[in-house]
Image: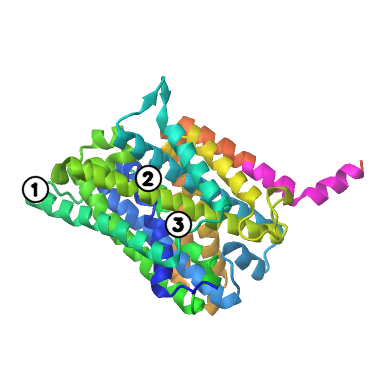
Amino acid sequence: MSEKLGRLGAVSIALGGMIGGGIFAVLGVVAEMSGPAAWLAFTGGGVVAFCAGYSYVRLQRLGDVSGGSVSFLQEFGESTTVAGMVGWTLLFGYIGSMGMYAFAFGSFATKLLGVETALGVPLRPVVSVLSVLGFVLLNVLGARASGVTEVLLVAAKVGILLIFGVWGFYFGARTGQLTTGFSSVATGGLLMSAALSFVAFQGWQLLFYDEGSLRNARTTIPQAIYFSIPASLGLYVLVAVVTTSLLRPETIAANPEVSLAIAAEPFMGQMGFILISVAALFSTGSAINATLFSAAHFATGMLEDDLLPDRIGDADADGAPTRTLLVLGLITAAFTAYGSLQGITSFASLAFITVFGSMSFLAFRHRAGLRTGTLPAVGVVGAVLFFPSLVYHLAMMEPAVFSVVLVVTVVLLGLEILYFERETIRSEIDGV
């Protein structure tokens, strides 16, 4: 029997889930939209995410239940349909996140190799799809990083980003290039970019699925969440300030997926580009692997509760069901092959805004049992502001992306309604 993880291991899971791929995939898109005010956008997203984290922790204690959002909804008397639809939304949020990580993985890999096409075929989608299929195979074979390995990987990723941030901040201050971004707040699409950054703060909730692998989980999980979200935010702010100060807006707009690596070149030279790119490959790769593992186990729990069709996987399988891994992998591969980075990021952010906002609302409804109802209220208000602002931005500025996100959302909602109302629909058809 493997040894259970303590506080350090729990923090590593949470930090690895957030920093593991989010900053490399999201930074350029957020910076392209909000410019030097990108750090303020991340701050807004981080505050709302922290309020959601508080809501999760308090709901777990109030209901004395394990498992996260779906379990909370079931415990507090919501209908199976509502719980199931939230579960499906979260599952597709994970798929969007993996698609985003795979997109960034392919972008960094092709830029690092200096080869972006072969026989006239763009290599980024090919590399992205191969990365997803490779990690599906690893999970089917049962490979997973040990607790010690996870701690070391997270320490390495955080260390590299800290070196980039501190060195870049010093370089920018010495050369007079640092900017606060306050002058661009009014025109920088701050609210919309904060909503877009939200996906970079998902990952801490994975702790609720790994509760059985943690020592003193009911105290370890809150400590890890309350530390990891502010820590991630601090690192994001530092990296965002450096990147937007050292790169011109047109450079970020032309290379949003690898802007972090390009920003390292002025003070670290070509070696900086290589170092950040290699770190991005490890980070996004490990993020795909960890999210796939957790999403598959989350789906297994939904299978056990009859919230997913049996054809998606075997709830009695030992470990993550192979069919579930294949389904998740194939949908992710389609997302990353055919979607744009902003489209995938927007879809994933909207999914997590919906779920985390719902949990904040649930906690606010049961605020009589909480130490404070203010944090859940802030989480609800943030989600209510984020969701329509991001939808509006997509509709006005990115109509093609908006159309794709809208079609995927409508199809997903249609499938959810057909599945959860199947008995009612069947009885009505039989009665005709």
User: Which amino acid, mark 2?
Assistant: Ala
Indicate the quadrant where residue 321 lies.
bottom right
- Binning the other alpha carbons within 10 Å of mark 3 as few (below 14), some (14 to 19) or many (20 upward) gives many
Give me the C-alpha separation between circle 1 and circle 2. Answer: 28 Å
Q: In this view, does 7 lie above or below 92?
A: below
Q: Which residue is drawn at 49% across and 37% down?
A: 129
Please indicate whether residue 213 sits to the left or right of residue 37 in the image. right
- Nearest to the eye among marks 1 and 2: give it: 2
Q: Which residue is tagged 1?
A: 176
* Residue topped by disc 3: 202
* Residue 228 in the figure: left or right of residue 332: left
Alpha carbon separation for disc pair 2 and 3: 13 Å
Please name the amino acid that badge 1 sits on: Gly
State the extent of the magenta-drawn residues as a range: 412-430
Which label was assigned to residue 342? none
Q: Quick one: label 2, few (<14), some, or many (20+) residues within 10 Å?
A: many
Q: What element carries label 2?
A: helix
Q: Looking at the image, tell me whether mark 1 or mark 2 is earlier in sequence order.
A: 2
Which label sits on residue 25? 2
| Residue 163, position as x, y percentages in the image | 21, 56
